[in-house]
Image: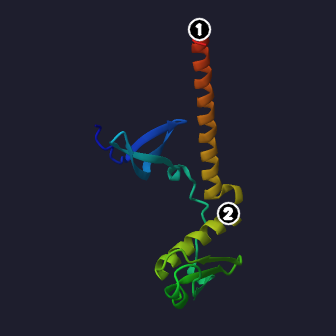
Amino acid sequence: MSSLVQKLLIVSRTCFDQSCATTCVLPLIDQRISKNNVNVNITEQIRYKSYKRFLDYSKLPKLEENELEEQHVRGSGPGGQATNKTSNAVILKHVPTGLVVKCHETRSLSQNRKIARELLLKKLDNLINGEESLEKQEERLSKRDSIKKQQKQKKMTDLKKAFEERENLK
């Protein structure tokens, strides 16, 4: 009998281009499977790579409270009477640009206000900075890593194929 495999949180550093990004392997799903009367704990893992260190925050616009119009309205969706009676959804409007964001992600008004401001800031950044917005910068870094990963996989398959031909394994 084998012992149960426990969830792991592994923090490592992955290097690319003379700079490092933090890489975390996080447990996503924990399942127990009984196979031949042996309990096995399977943990599917996702990989999260943070690019925050490499982003240029200097062009990020500032949200001025006097430029915002905020309304608290009743939410919608599942939740029944509790959702229908409380005004915890937030509609936030940036007056100079006319951008509007509605947030009803949580039951808490204060959390919805905070999330709405983050969403509005992201929209405003995309509108003002375009290709230099934080979202586009992160997209470019992610795409670069993806291309490097594909190149590495291709190199490994080529090496494997060359080894098999050299050793007459096929």
Q: Nearer the viewer, residue 93 or 165?
A: 165
Mark on residue 168? 1
Nearer-N-terminus badge (1/2)? 2
| x 59%, y 8%: residue | 168
Q: Are marks 1 and 2 in contact (CB under 8 Å)?
A: no
Label 2 packing within 10 angstroms: few (<14), some (14-19), many (20+): some
Marks 1/2: CA–CA distance? 55 Å
Mark on residue 8? none
Residue 168 drawn above or below residue 3? above
Mark 2 secondary-structure assignment: helix
Where residue 75 sits, quadrant-wise, is bottom right
Where residue 119 sits, quadrant-wise, is bottom right
Label 1 packing within 10 angstroms: few (<14), some (14-19), many (20+): few
Q: Which residue is mark 2?
A: 126
Q: How is the image coloured?
A: rainbow
Q: Position of residue 169 (x, y in %)?
A: 57, 12
Residue 50 drawn above or below residue 83? above
Q: Residue furthest front?
A: 36
Mark 1 secondary-structure assignment: loop
Q: Nearer the viewer, residue 24 or 79?
A: 79
